[in-house]
Image (spheres, rainbow, N blue to C red):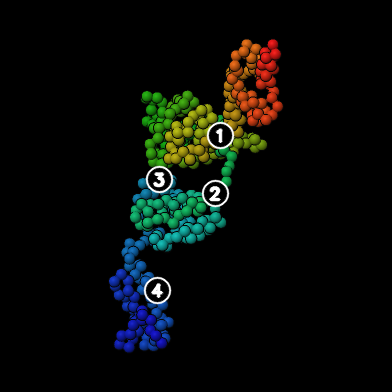
Amino acid sequence: MRRPRNLVKRGGWYYARMFVKGRTYRRALGTRELETARDLLAGTLDDIEREIREASMPNAVTVSEFAGRWMTEWVKQRRNEKGVKLTEQRWKQHIEPAIGVIDLAALTYADLRALRTRLDGLMKPQTVGHVLSDVRCLLRYAVDAGEIVKAPWRRDLMPRIAEHAPRRLTDEQLDRILLFARPKESLCIHLAVHTGLRWGELRTLQWRHVVDEPRPHLVLEGTKSGRVRRVPLSAGAREAIEGLRKIADSVYVSPFRSKNSCNIAYRSTGRMPKGNRVVWHWHQLRHTFACCYLERGGSLAALQRMLGHSTSRMTERYAGLSDEALFADLDRVERRTAAAHQDRPRRSGAAHVASERKVAAAGTPVALSGEHAAGGGRNGNGSGPKRGPIRVLENTRARGANS
């Protein structure tokens, strides 16, 4: 029986041998029998190859080990306290049990697809998107840090969220909410619906953030993105600020210090009659501000800066126009179109023919265009019957020749 090239014999014992990049690797098979050595050879060579591959990656870390670095160097530097808390919660509950023990360099698309399948059975698509966004952020940071060359991420991993009606409040709903709100609550609602402030931004807003020069505006520091944002104050917002200034008893603008914005919404809804209640939450005021700003002619770029969004795509999700605004815009376009047609001078067909008859009777050449210049027929190829001004001109010339 012929012995394989990777199988060598020394002192009566068999060894597995492998050549890699000019180096020789040997492993003892622990047998003197050739048939037994042949059976052990394939598995031993795989072990040698695996050891060489692991030795070539001395800094290999698991996903959990790198996640600690990502939390410290990126998440805690870019997100506020609430964002850090939610990220840690999603990591411990959903991400770490699924892919935490896998080597970061060995993470594949199949592992991420298995995570997506697991999440689909536990939560809503929007929540699944939040969890997978954290995974995508971690992988992008791993690429920037040089831990991996390319992230095993594909766009089809993100769930598709069904379209929904605009989250804005109608004028009737907002009037009803203000009707049953207490005076202090009403002032805060007015300020939010005229500035688009989140509840956390309104709760931490201080009087030193209200600036009057060169024009009244707010300077927001503790925002969700961590960047300083300036929000101009409209007439309605200035009235709400003045009303809150009269009842101010601390350095904070808002008289409410609770972290939960649902308290105001629940209390105002509870005061309404049971048969005609408006169920709402505070963030709908932000959507209402965005929609009303665009409906009144504001630009998307300015709205993006006031809301503090990093991309215009997020702003477009907030600023969904109502059906009434779409119909009103269509009516405005139709009125402009009708006015443009009325202002343009128009001549009827009979008046055009009469003027050409006068010119032909005077003996002046007539310059014709369209189907008449082509010599007759409707197709303009001269094959059809001659009608209209052409026939009039021929009759005039015939009378002149006979005379």
Question: Nearer the N terminus, badge 2 or badge 3?
Answer: 3
* Front tag of 1 and 3: 1
Crowding at mark 2 (Cα within 10 Å: few <14, some 14-19, many 20+)? few
- Secondary structure at badge 4 equals helix
- What residue lies at 56% left-to-right and 34% top-to-bottom? 321
CA gap, disc 2 and disc 4 = 42 Å
CA gap, disc 2 and disc 1 = 22 Å
- What residue lies at 40% left-to-right and 44% top-to-bottom? 80
CA gap, disc 3 and disc 4 = 45 Å
Image disc number at residue 321: 1
Which amino acid type is marked by label 2? Arg
Residue 50 screen position, x and y as percent: 37, 70
Is label 2 in contact with label 3 (beta carbons under 8 Å)? Answer: no
CA gap, disc 2 and disc 3 = 25 Å
Asked if one can make out residue 250 in the rendered structure from this viewpoint, the answer is: no
Image disc number at residue 234: none
Q: Which residue is mark 2?
A: 160
Q: Which residue is mark 4?
A: 46
Which amino acid type is marked by label 3? Arg
CA gap, disc 1 and disc 3 = 30 Å
Which amino acid type is marked by label 1? Leu
- Secondary structure at badge 1 equals loop
Image position of 69 (left or right of 392): left
Q: Which residue is mark 3?
A: 79
- Secondary structure at badge 3 equals loop
Q: Residue furthest front?
A: 402
In the image, 113 versus 392, the foreground residue is 392
